Image: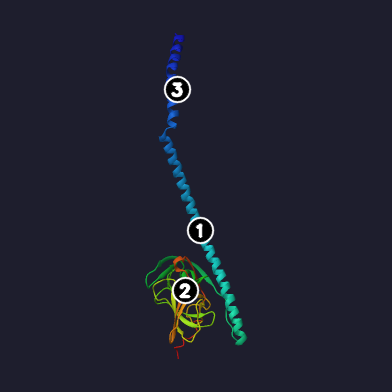
Amino acid sequence: MGHKRRKMTMDRSLLLLPLYCAVALWLIRFQQTPPLEAMESLSTQIRSALFERIAAVSSFFQLREQNDRLALQNAMLLERELSLRNTFEESSARESFQGFTGKGSHSFITARIVDRRYDAKENLLLIDKGSSSGIAENMAVVTPDGLVGRVISVATNYAKVMPVIHADFSVSGISALNGTHGLLQWQGGHESTAMLRHVPSSSTITEGERILTTDYSTFVLRGIPLGTVASVEHGSQFHTVTVDLAVDFSRLSHVLVSLQRPDPRKPPLNNK
């Protein structure tokens, strides 16, 4: 009886063997079918996209850190350049005017432009530093290329800047070559040019001369580049002088806020 039962079990196993083989062959074939290959391809694409996104985010923060580091380096270089330039000018002046003294030290805070409004006349900038960082109204805003504008309002962590390319902005300028003075103002239109007004017809200002800020300003120290003379139209009383601005506002992303301002004790000329 037991021998008969073992034989029946063996017969069942032999009958199931072809079924097992068929299932195994079907599974092998299914693994090679297009649906599975498509699923594997989709999985690979998803993994690649995730890796690219992670790499992009990592690269973004690395670039941001690099920009902040470069802005700090620019502040240090600009501080050194202005100090050397003013020291040289003051040393030259002392040779002719004994007793003249001045300071050549500067301090800057780096800031990032977080918002801007550009239109025909009233352009404005918003920076990510405010009173908590030491920013105050009427401080000059610059880059290593030149003057950007001045701070007109301050919040705790932000400040609003009126740029050179604003209808209400004006600043005293001087030719670095021959000392010709004028008042730089933006007349609207293109953001890369402004006019140097009140230049007397007796002056010898010519194309290519660099225009810098002067001691006459109430908010910015002297020696900051304003631009380069692009053209001169001679008039009977005053020249019409067009200046290519030193700062490229279309590419502006970081700025430096100057903590040092002209002496507030200096009285204006219209006071008696």
Tell me how far mark 2 sits from mark 1, CA to CA: 30 Å
Q: The residue tagged with tag 2: helix, strand or loop?
A: strand
| Residue at the disc numbered 3 | 21
Residue 187 or residue 134, whichever sits in front: 187
Q: The residue tagged with tag 1: helix, strand or loop?
A: helix
Tell me the residue at 54%/67% (across/down): 74
- Is the residue marked by circle 2 packed among few (<14), some (14-19), or many (20+) residues within 10 Å? many
Colour approach in the figure: rainbow
Judged from this view, the residue extending furthest toward the right is 95
Q: Amino acid at mark 2?
A: Asp
Please tell me whether residue 234 is drawn above or below residue 107 in the rendered image: below
Residue 167 or residue 227, whichever sits in front: 227
The quarter of the rendered structure image containing the C terminus is: bottom left
The image shows residue 190 at horizontal and vertical percentages of 41, 71
| Residue at the disc numbered 1 | 63
Q: The residue tagged with tag 3: helix, strand or loop?
A: helix
For marks 2 and 1, the one nearer the N-term is 1
Q: Amino acid at mark 1?
A: Leu
**Number of numbered discs present?**
3
Judged from this view, the residue extending furthest toward the top is 1
Foreground disc of the pair 2, 1: 2
- Is the residue marked by circle 1 packed among few (<14), some (14-19), or many (20+) residues within 10 Å? few
Q: Are marks 3 and 2 in contact (CB under 8 Å)?
A: no
Q: Are marks 3 and 1 in contact (CB under 8 Å)?
A: no
Q: Amino acid at mark 3?
A: Cys
The image shows residue 244 at horizontal and vertical percentages of 47, 73
Tell me how far mark 3 sits from mark 1, CA to CA: 59 Å
Tell me the residue at 47%/45% (across/down): 48
| Residue at the disc numbered 2 | 244
